[in-house]
Image: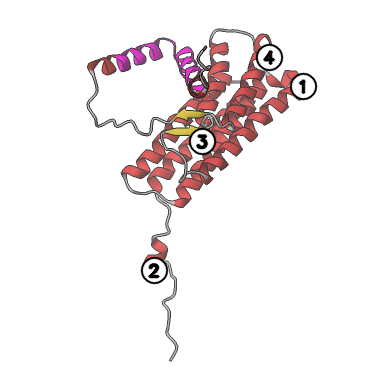
Amino acid sequence: MPEIKPRKTLFNPELRRRGIYVLPNLFTTAALFGGFFAIVQAMKGSFELAAVGIFVAMVLDGLDGRVARMTRTQSAFGAEYDSLSDMVSFGVAPALVTYAWTLKDMGRLGWIAAFIYCVGAALRLARFNTTLEVIDRRYFQGLPSPAAAALVTGFFWVMIDKQIAAADVRWLACGLVIFAGISMVSNVRFYSFKDVNLRRSVPFIFVVAIALGFAVLSYDTPVALFGLFVAYALSGYVLALMQLLRRKPSPPPVA
């Protein structure tokens, strides 16, 4: 008599294990909304609100993975959903917002620069997903897409906050967008901070530095955020230059 296999119904435990966890994906959805909100605000000409939307998406994107690990609700669905959300919030949104702000006045070069950034983010996310198990977790290969988005977004946020006309800095914006796009697909390594243990005791000066950081952030938020991510974007190239100088062979001794 042939073996009767159980039907895969809604009450089958095998199917229940394939369900979607709500909590981490709720943060991912909120991050996706931040990117969508930024695009909508850019269409309305509210570029400062668009910048806020992208930075809020960054904060939420940093939380969803940690929430999933803390609650042990990691899933393949969540990882794929997070990548799609990142593509919208940190790939499409910064490119379109910057294009609407000033790159559109540069003609063909403007949309080419925006596309370089957008495709750089897509390639960066695809490479990250396919090399997740083989790379050194202490470093990112290429500039992370949230940091690239913060670099581009922070720039036009500072310009708007300081009432600098977009037309006066369009070439600088174009160069920055292209730099961010190329940096995402480069082989330059950027520190990931994933080996930082927040449960470990730290020197008192570290707590003082955090307090000063919050004070600077509250005093001039756009400048503080932009300066922070400029430093991070340059840190990878400084690290690569230092490694290159260490490998440079010393000249032979003079006889």
- With 64 as the anchor, is 130 left or right in this view? right
User: Which circle, 3 or 1, is nearer the viewer?
Assistant: 1
Task: Tell me the quarter of the image containing the N terminus.
Answer: bottom left
Counting residues from the N terminus, which is met first, the one under dot 2 or under dot 1?
2
| Percent position of residue 77, x then y | 47, 51
Q: Quick one: SS at disc 4?
A: helix
Q: Is residue 86 visible?
A: yes
Q: Nearer the viewer, residue 136 or 229?
A: 136
Query: CA separation, marks 2 and 1?
Result: 58 Å
Q: Residue at x 40, y 14 (%)?
A: 217
According to the picture, the residue beneath numbered tag 3 turns out to be 33
User: Which circle, 2 or 1, is nearer the viewer?
Assistant: 1
| Amino acid type for the residue under numbered disc 2 | Asn
Mark 3, other Cα within 10 Å: few <14 / some 14–19 / many ≥20: some
Q: Is residue 44 visible?
A: no
| Amino acid type for the residue under numbered disc 1 | Gly
Query: CA separation, marks 1 and 4?
Result: 12 Å
Residue 228 vertical position relative to residue 78 in the rendered view, above or below: above
- Can you tell which mark lies on residue 107? 1
User: Which circle, 3 or 4, is nearer the viewer?
Assistant: 4
The verdict on residue 225 being magenta is yes
Counting residues from the N terminus, which is met first, the one under dot 1 or under dot 4?
1
- Can you tell which mark lies on residue 171? 4
| Amino acid type for the residue under numbered disc 3 | Phe
| Amino acid type for the residue under numbered disc 4 | Trp
Mark 4, other Cα within 10 Å: few <14 / some 14–19 / many ≥20: some
Query: CA separation, marks 4 and 2?
Result: 59 Å
- With 166 as the anchor, is 31 left or right in this view? left
Query: CA separation, marks 3 and 1?
Result: 29 Å
Q: Which residues are magenta?
A: 209-233
User: Which circle, 4 or 2, is nearer the viewer?
Assistant: 4
